[in-house]
Image (tube, rainbow, N blue to C red):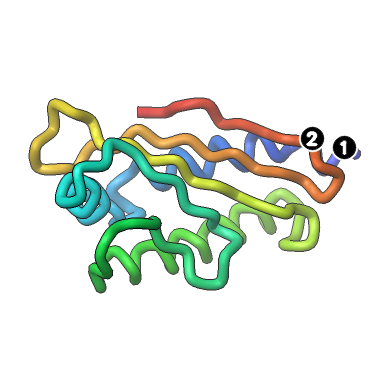
Amino acid sequence: MGRIAVLAGVAHDIAHHAASGLSYISPYLALALREVHLETTDVDLTAANPYPRLIKEVESLRIAMVSLRSTAFRILGKHGLSETDVTSMVLHATPAPWDHQGYVLYTRVTITSQSGRKFDSHWLG
């Protein structure tokens, strides 16, 4: 159980990375969401092909989401955990409404462990 308790920190680390420029999901995600008049989205990073629902395919965003998925599992591994320890890692992302270029994202990650326990990074921005 001690290892699983670190999942709140894992969620925070993933959310922080997603919000940073290093994830390369911005501005592509914000622009794609605004194109279809959505304010927020969620993506399960455990999915084989993580991509936000209801938005058109943008190659740059697709590549960034696959990379974010890899980074999420690498962060999980740094804490001594593996893919089998979690059932979902969901990224919630909302572009800052005042940032018209789409570079600022508010992010949150929720992780569900195999036992069903939920861990939440809470919103970062």
- Residue drawn at x 71%, y 49% is 79
Residue 78 in the image: x percent, y percent?
Answer: 67, 54
Q: Nearer the viewer, residue 82 or 112?
A: 112
* Count of marks placed on residues: 2
Q: Secondary structure at mark 1?
A: loop
Q: Quadrant of the N terminus?
A: top right
User: Which quarter of the picture shows residue 111?
Assistant: top right
Residue found at the very far right of the displayed protein: 1
Q: Nearer the viewer, residue 98 or 35?
A: 35
Give the distance between the C-alpha atoms of the residues marked 1 and 2, in whole angstroms. 5 Å
- Residue drawn at x 23%, y 30% is 96
* Number of the label disc, if any, that sits on residue 112: none
* Number of the label disc, if any, that sits on residue 5: 2
Left or right of 3 in this view: 20: left
Residue 17 in the image: x percent, y percent?
Answer: 43, 46
- Residue drawn at x 79%, y 36% is 117
Name the residue type under label 2.
Ala
Q: Secondary structure at mark 2?
A: helix
Q: Are marks 1 and 2 in contact (CB under 8 Å)?
A: yes
Residue 15 in the image: x percent, y percent?
Answer: 47, 40
Q: Quadrant of the C terminus?
A: top left
Q: Is residue 123 above or below residue 43?
A: above
How packed mark 1 is, by other alpha carbons closer than 10 Å (few <14, some 14-19, many 20 or more), is few
Residue 48 in the image: x percent, y percent?
Answer: 56, 72
Left or right of 95 in this view: 1: right
* Number of the label disc, if any, that sits on residue 2: 1
Q: Nearer the viewer, residue 124 or 33?
A: 33
Name the residue type under label 1.
Gly
Left or right of 104 in this view: 10: right
How packed mark 2 is, by other alpha carbons closer than 10 Å (few <14, some 14-19, many 20 or more), is few
- Residue drawn at x 20%, y 43% is 37
